[in-house]
């Protein structure tokens, strides 16, 4: 256990976040996401079973600079005829302390983008459309 790092951030996830470079993306998926199918295309798949996505996002946020050159947050859009629960986005925004724009992507477009991600973390999130992509930025010099 390390001081200042949330216990929901596993050693493998911490290593993965550290290895990522500017512009790399990580998917925090819901429990229903077909991540292991996409992992065959190159994305590393990590498991965080039982941990809600917002808890993972809150654990990652202090360790991960969001990209400032592109919209750094993407979420899956509802399929036609279905609806989004606005509370999911609100929980994710609060966990990330993020008030900027969020792009929404059609389901299959989101899947294609997820295949190109550096990693996919399958959370225990059970909310529909509870998938989010974060684009890593450059850590500011203090």
Image: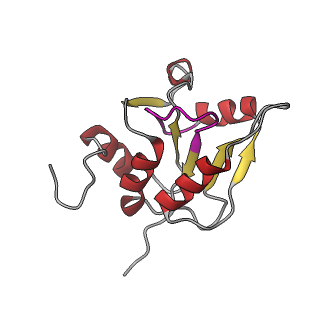
Q: Does residue 108 belong to the magenta stretch?
A: no
Quadrant of the rendered image containing residue 115 = top right
- Residue 20 visible? The answer is no
Tell me if residue 125 comes above or below residue 38 in the rendering.
Answer: below
Which residue is located at x 44 percent, y 51 percent?
57
Estimate the x, y position of residue 14 in percent, counting from the top left: 31, 47
Estimate the x, y position of residue 95 in percent, counting from the top left: 47, 57
* Magenta segment main secondary structure: loop
Q: Does residue 126 belong to the magenta stretch?
A: yes
Tell me if residue 87 comes above or below residue 101 in the rendering.
Answer: above
Estimate the x, y position of residue 74 in percent, counting from the top left: 65, 49
Quadrant of the rendered image containing residue 70 = bottom right
In the image, 4: left or right of 77?
A: left
Which residue is located at x 51 percent, y 56 percent?
136
In the image, 75: left or right of 126?
A: right
The foreground one among 18 and 134 is: 134
The quadrant in which the C terminus is found is bottom left
Tell me if residue 141 comes above or below residue 93 in the rendering.
Answer: below
Estimate the x, y position of residue 10 in percent, counting from the top left: 28, 41
**Which segment is the magenta one?**
117-132
């Amino acid at each position: 256990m390390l001081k200042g790092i949330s216990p929901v951030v596993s050693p493998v996830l911490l290593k993965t976040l550290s290895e990522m470079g500017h512009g790399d993306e990580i998917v925090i998926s819901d429990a229903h996401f077909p991540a292991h199918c996409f992992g065959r295309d190159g994305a590393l798949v990590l498991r965080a079973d039982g941990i809600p996505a917002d808890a993972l996002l809150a654990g990652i946020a202090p360790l991960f600079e969001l990209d400032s050159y592109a919209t750094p947050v993407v979420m899956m859009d509802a399929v036609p005829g279905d609806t989004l629960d606005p509370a999911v986005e609100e929980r994710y925004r609060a966990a990330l302390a993020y008030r900027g724009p969020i792009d929404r992507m059609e389901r299959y477009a989101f899947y294609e983008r997820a295949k190109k991600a550096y990693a996919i973390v399958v959370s225990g999130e059970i909310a529909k459309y509870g998938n989010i992509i974060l684009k890593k930025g450059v850590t500011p010099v203090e």
